Every structure is written in C-alpha cells, then in structure tokens.
C-alpha cells in the first residue's frame, strides 16, 4: 500500500512537472503569438544557439511570470495558453542581453518578470485594445532606470547591438526574425520561423513578409548597412505584420503595419537613453488599429475577402 501511494505521488508529481514545462514553453512561444509548446522549444533552442544564458533568461522569465499568475489566481485558460509568460520571458532575456550577469541583474530579472505578469493582467483588464509587448517594454525600461538610479551609471553606457560587416539580403531578413528576441543569427531566425510554422504556417509566412518589408524599406532609406545586417529594421516589422493579421486577417493591413514600424525604429529618440526594444512594433500596430477605428471604410476596403479573427492576446492557434 505504501508503495502504491508512493507511485501515485510520483505520477502526480511527474504530471505537474510536465504540464508546467508545457505552459512555460507556451509562454516563450507567445512572444510571437503562438500558444504551442513545440514552438517555444524551438525558440529556446534558437536563443541557445546565440547564448545559452539568454535562453535561460527566457525560460526563467516565463516560469516566474506564469508562477505569479498561478499564485494570484488569474484565469486558468489564459495561464495554460502562456499569456502571462511571454512578457516576462522577454524581460528575462532582455536584461541578460543588456546587462552583465551580476547579482543585481538576477534580482532585476526576478522582480521584473513578476511585475510584467501583473502589468499584463492589468492591461488585459482595463485596456480595450491589445497591448502586445508593451508590458515588457515598460518594465524593462523601468528596470534600467532603477539600475541607473541605484548605481549612478548612465543608461547610455548600455551597449546596443554591435553592427557587423554587411551580409546578404536573405541573411538580414532572417536576422530580423532573430532580433525579435534580441538575437542576430540567421540560424536563430530559421529556428524561430520553423517554430512559428509548427504552430501556424500562415503566421510564419506573415512573419517572413514583415521582415522582408522592413529590410527592403531600410535599404531604400539608406539606413546603416551594419544595422540592417543584424535585423534592426526587420523584427518590429515582422511582429507588426503578424499582430495586424491576427486582428484583421488582411495582407494589405499587415504590410502597412510593417511599413509604419520602420520610421519609428529609425527615429526612436536616443535621448531617452533606453533601447527601443519592441516599442516600434507596439506603436505601429496601435497606429494602424487607431486608423481602422477612425475610418472603418478603410478597414473594409483593405480587408475585402478577409474575416476578423481573435485578438493577438487571445490566440487562435491550437494549444499543444
């Protein structure tokens, strides 16, 4: 009898561990709008190609954000879909990209990941429009500002991605996919696209189209070739294209959002002393959604033959 009870406990614990792993991976996958654990696993592998430490930051962030959601008894379905993991995952990986892995950084990672989960919940409760990765952006900026206040170091000293020797167009487009999670490797970009396609091939195509549009626009604007090569003009465009597709399922509107994101990236005020992160994507998506709200005729014209789908923070893909 004692052995049977022990086996029952072992099976229960194994089930909890497996379910928790799936939810944490879905949280990572939701960075690019997919509630699919397999997608999250490929994202983590893609991050590890560039930096195992950054991959760890994403996992820890998602786990902390999800844990906070469980403790505070948020909606169980939303928790299971990874909704409270993706902003926290981004906070976790971003801090390990932007800062040295010293004790202060780890403290900020834990606190920031927890706060991102709470801000995500508040945004879902009180905002009538999708806030996307805005909680990640705001929490990360706050963490950097706190670090500046405590240490006295200027935020301007935080190094941006280092431009590299110009590469080919295809590699720049793939780097744009990788840059969504602050990577710059074409291999990482391929793994990210594969992960999205595993969940929804249309979303993967939209992500690729967005990065192509952003990269082409940056080339046309004669932006620095080194910055183009590491995907700085592709990642926000990629995210914006997917986000608007999830709202209107219109290719024209998705391309419009991608186009709008590029000048925001180009002219993001350096005087703020903080990295742009995914703010251009969020702002571009809001601009397009605002235009559609102000001019429904425009929305109907550009959405002919399409149907409105679920909001990005209410994923449509099958949970795995």
Image (cartoon, rainbow, N blue to C red):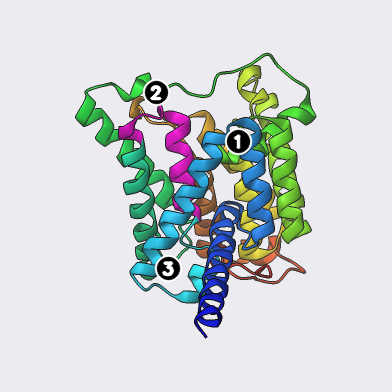
Please give left or right for residue 169 compared with residue 211 in the image.
right
Q: Which residue is mark 3?
A: 128
Residue 232 picture quarter: top right
* Residue 81 pos. (x, y %): 56, 67
* Residue 278 pos. (x, y %): 50, 42
Q: Which residues are magenta?
A: 86-105
Label 1 vs 3, first from the N-terminus:
3
Q: Which residue is mark 2?
A: 158
* Residue 17 pos. (x, y %): 54, 64
Please give left or right for residue 291 compared with residue 297 in the image.
left
Query: At 48% from the left edge and 29% from the top edge, which residue is drawn?
Result: 267
Query: At 20% from the left edge and 30% from the top edge, which residue is drawn?
Result: 150
Label 1 vs 2, first from the N-terminus:
2
Residue 97 drawn in magenta: yes
**Closest to the observer, 117 or 302:** 117
Q: Please tell me how crowded label 1 is: few (under 14), some (14-19), or many (20+) other residues with Cα within 10 Å.
A: many
- For label 2, the SS is loop
**Closest to the observer, 152 or 297:** 152
Query: At 44% from the left edge and 29% from the top edge, which residue is drawn?
Result: 98
Q: Is residue 298 above or below residue 2?
A: above
């Amino acid at each position: 009898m004692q052995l049977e009870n022990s086996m029952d406990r072992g099976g229960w614990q194994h089930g909890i561990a497996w379910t928790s792993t799936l939810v944490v991976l879905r949280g990572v996958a939701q960075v690019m709008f997919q509630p699919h654990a397999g997608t999250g696993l490929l994202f983590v592998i893609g991050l590890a190609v560039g930096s195992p430490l950054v991959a760890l930051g994403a996992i820890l962030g998602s786990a902390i954000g999800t844990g906070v959601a469980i403790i505070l008894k948020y909606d169980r379905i939303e928790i299971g879909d990874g909704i409270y993991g993706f902003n926290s995952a981004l906070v976790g990986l971003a801090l390990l990209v932007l800062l040295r892995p010293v004790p202060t950084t780890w403290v900020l990672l834990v606190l920031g990941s927890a706060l991102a989960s709470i801000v995500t919940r508040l945004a879902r409760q009180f905002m009538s429009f999708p806030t996307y990765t805005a909680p990640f952006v705001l929490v990360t900026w706050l963490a950097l500002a706190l670090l500046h206040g405590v240490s006295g170091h200027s935020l301007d000293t935080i190094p941006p991605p280092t431009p590299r020797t110009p590469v080919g167009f295809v590699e720049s487009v793939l780097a744009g996919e990788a840059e969504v999670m602050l990577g710059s490797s074409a291999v990482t970009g391929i793994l990210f696209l594969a992960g999205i396609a595993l969940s929804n091939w249309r979303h993967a195509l939209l992500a690729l189209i967005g990065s192509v549009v952003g990269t082409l626009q940056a080339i046309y604007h004669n932006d620095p070739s080194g910055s183009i090569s590491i995907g700085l003009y592709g990642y926000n465009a990629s995210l914006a294209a997917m986000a608007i597709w999830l709202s209107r399922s219109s290719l024209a509107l998705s391309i419009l959002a991608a186009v709008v994101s590029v000048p925001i990236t180009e002219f993001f005020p350096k005087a703020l002393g903080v990295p742009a992160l995914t703010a251009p994507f969020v702002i571009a998506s809001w601009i397009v959604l605002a235009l559609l709200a102000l001019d429904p005729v425009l929305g109907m014209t550009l959405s002919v033959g399409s149907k409105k789908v679920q909001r990005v923070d209410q994923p449509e893909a099958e949970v795995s």
